[in-house]
Amino acid sequence: MNAEEYLKRGEEYSKNDEFDQAIADFTEAFRIDPNLEAAKNKLSIEYYSRGVASFKKGDAGSAIADINEAIKLTPNDASLYGARGYIYEESGNYNRAISDFTEAIRHAPTAPRYSSRANCYYQKCKEYRKAYDEKNFLKYYGLAINDQKSAVELDPTIADYKEILELMISERDKRMTEMDTSAYFERCITRVNKGELDGAIDDITEVIRLDENNIDAYSLRGALYDTKKQYDKVIDDFTKVIKLDENNITAYQCRGAAYYEKLREFSTKGDFFNCLKFIHFAIFDYEKALKLEPVGTDKYKNYQETLECLRRELEQNMPKGW
């Protein structure tokens, strides 16, 4: 048989997905006539087809081996790099997947290839986050976002591409905020330990600016204001905590204590109206803390004792002009 005959028979095998026989005939045709481009191209396609079939059966190793052979025959075929990249991606080998998608994009940039490479970069982000490698985390997040943007630009009709891009940007921004807040928290604690309360308050205020719903930040700033005896600010911060978490026992206790300190301020001024107001506020907060605190704990007993003292003080002072 000559090369053309092997080629023709190989085509028949190919139509019936008889990959092994087709590859054998195309190989023989190409061996007989190395200048027969049709034989080389069909042999490459057949390796590719058998590789895809192997991958569908769960044999990624054989699939990659076949596509490797296809690439040797037609090294400028972008689809082959894309296919191998997809197999690597599905197998969790993201570095090799990135390399293949990069080569595919170099030959023929398409939206799916950019989106696939973006996903690989995104998966690398997860790895770096688990390893607490923030530098590479941010680097690969940037690469993922840039690729997903390219996918959207090349094919703006695919809604999924836009949704993925928005999700990536949102997650990246959230993580950057977390990183910033973490750094300010750490410096705040360092300054507290050094006795630099004003600087500590500045840092924790920056955390609140970045994350206005950060309960820990409001609680810490409230405690710092308490140390500085700035009770109005203590009350404001723990009121914010209670708005964010209405069952926060510590916030009720701390705000109640600040109300009591305000009571003492107004008592020294002879301002009985405000004394009456703040003692009621304090009683309300300690009653709430007592209700939320499990019965029998040391804190529960302390809240009970504080409430009894507040109520006695209210009773003792009411007749004196309140």
Image (spheres, rainbow, N blue to C red):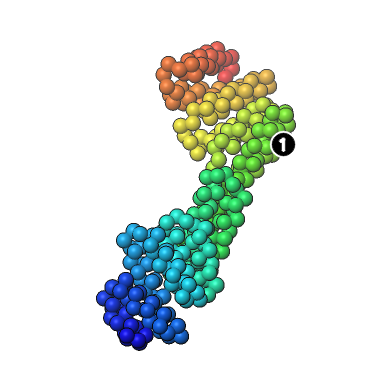
Name the residue at 39% across, 64% down.
63
Name the residue at 63% across, 38% down.
185
From the viewer's side, name the closer residue of 124 and 52. 52
Q: Give x and y (percent) for residue 32.
A: 40, 83
Task: Name the quarter where the C terminus is drawn.
Answer: top right
* Label 1: how many Cα within 10 Å (few below 14, some 14–19, many 20+): some
Name the residue at 50% across, 14% down.
305
The residue under label 1 is which amino acid type?
Gly
The correct choice, above or below, for 60 with respect to 183 in the image is below
The correct choice, above or below, for 105 with respect to 273 in the image is below
Q: Is residue 159 left or right of residue 131?
A: left
- Label 1, on which residue? 199
Q: Is residue 154 left or right of residue 53?
A: right
Q: Give x and y (percent) for residue 211.
A: 57, 45
Q: Is residue 217 left or right of residue 81?
A: right
**Looking at this rendering, what residue extends furthest in the left direction?**
16
Name the residue at 28% across, 73% down.
18
Q: Give x and y (percent) for residue 235.
A: 59, 31
Please say whether residue 152 is visible from this viewpoint: no
The correct choice, above or below, for 52 with respect to 290 in the image is below
From the viewer's side, name the closer residue of 83 and 12. 12
